[in-house]
Image (cartoon, rainbow, N blue to C red):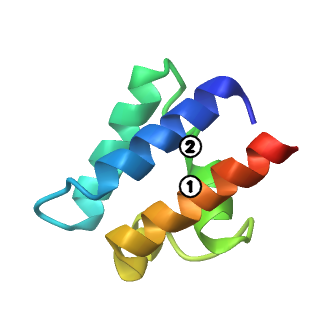
Amino acid sequence: KTPEVQAALSLVAEGIVGIANWSEEAVEKLLHQAEAGQELSHGKLNQPLRIAVTGCKVGAGIFETICLLGKEKTKSRINRALELAGDA
């Protein structure tokens, strides 16, 4: 992925543990903030994030999936995907 996408995913991984009111809406807001912070178009992170947290290109809604996985597991999976992307 592009450096901007990787940077935005890092922002999501770090920001996710700081969400006080854990909800799909809060996760969505964080994603949009990360996209805006890297000047990415709305929704640009959905597919890379889905692959990072589930390993699949298709599945349930990404915000719902992240909420079910929880903060720590989501952060761990994003960080692992970023590590693997760095090795590519």
Q: Which residue lies furthest to the right in this view?
A: 88
Label 2 sits on what residue type? Leu
> Could you tell me which residue is drawn at 22 percent across and 67 percent down?
23
Quadrant into which the N terminus falls: top right
Label 2 neighbour load within 10 Å: few <14, some 14-19, many 20+: many
Tell me the residue that label 2 is attached to.
Answer: 45
Give whichever of 38, 47 is nearer the camera: 38
Secondary element under disc 1, as helix, strand or loop, is helix
Quadrant into which the C terminus falls: top right
Secondary element under disc 2, as helix, strand or loop, is loop
Whole-number angstrom distance, CA of label 2 to CA of label 1: 15 Å
Percent across and percent down for residue 25 are: 24, 58
Q: In the displayed structure, does residue 86 sit left or right of residue 74?
A: right
Compared to residue 85, the image places residue 3 above or below, namely above
Residue 81, quarter of the rendered image: bottom right
Q: Residue furthest left?
A: 21
Tell me the residue that label 1 is attached to.
Answer: 79
Compared to residue 65, the image places residue 4 above or below, namely above
Give whichever of 60, 26 is nearer the camera: 26
Q: Mark 2 and 1 residues: CB-CB less than 8 Å, in contact?
A: no
Question: N-terminal of the two: label 2 or label 1?
Answer: 2
> Could you tell me which residue is drawn at 42 percent across and 39 percent down?
11
> Could you tell me which residue is drawn at 56 percent across and 57 percent down?
78
Percent across and percent down for residue 62 are: 50, 65
Q: Is residue 10 visible?
A: yes
